[in-house]
Amino acid sequence: MAGHRIFTTSFASIYPHYVAKAERKGHTRAEVHQVITWLTGYDDAGLERVLADETDLETFFAQAPAMNPDASLITGVICGLRVEEVEDPLMQQIRWMDKLVDEVARGKKMTSILRTP
């Protein structure tokens, strides 16, 4: 069975939308970077590389250096779906990233976004 078309979308094509969303609400590219690196384990150089290579989302998550073990603590609704109930593991990872960026844009405290005790 073929995956959802978002799986073949490049990270580089959605990243500017994440940054624009955060900046429209008075937040920064650095905050977006912080939540993405927290989730995936990519460092700044790694993110720049996947952006330059136009890596698709399936590969982006498959090659993520270290998915954060606390990612399963990400809950809530994004695009009308509860992220904790998404069954496809890749789609759930994408929704986690969407949710983190949404929380940055809404001005949630970084300690809460990063699920820091």
Image (cartoon, grey):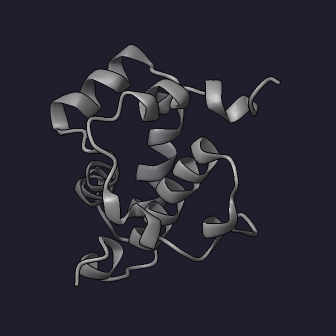
Q: What residue sits 76% from the left and 69% below the top? A: 80
> Could you tell me how many numbered marks the image carries?
0
Q: What residue sits 51% from the left and 58% below the top? A: 96
On the question of residue 117 being in view, the answer is yes
- Location of residue 85 by image quarter: bottom right
Residue 106 image offset from top left, x and y in percent: 46, 77
Question: Could you say which is closer to the camera, residue 30 or residue 68?
Answer: 68
| 66 on left or right of 56 | left
Image vertical order of residue 81 relative to residue 39, above or below: below
On the question of residue 24 being in view, the answer is no
Q: What residue sits 37% from the left and 27% below the top? A: 63
Residue 105 image offset from top left, x and y in percent: 44, 70
Question: Could you say which is closer to the camera, residue 6 or residue 52?
Answer: 6
- Location of residue 32 by image quarter: bottom left
Question: Could you say which is closer to the camera, residue 108 or residue 94?
Answer: 94
| 53 on left or right of 42 | right
| 9 on left or right of 54 | right
Residue 18 image offset from top left, x and y in percent: 47, 51
Image vertical order of residue 115 relative to residue 41, above or below: below
Q: What residue sits 45% from the left and 41% below the top? A: 16
Instruction: Locate the N terminus and report the quarter of the image it occupies.
Output: top right
Residue furthest toward the top?
Answer: 53
- Location of residue 73 by image quarter: bottom left
Image vertical order of residue 19 relative to residue 58, above or below: below
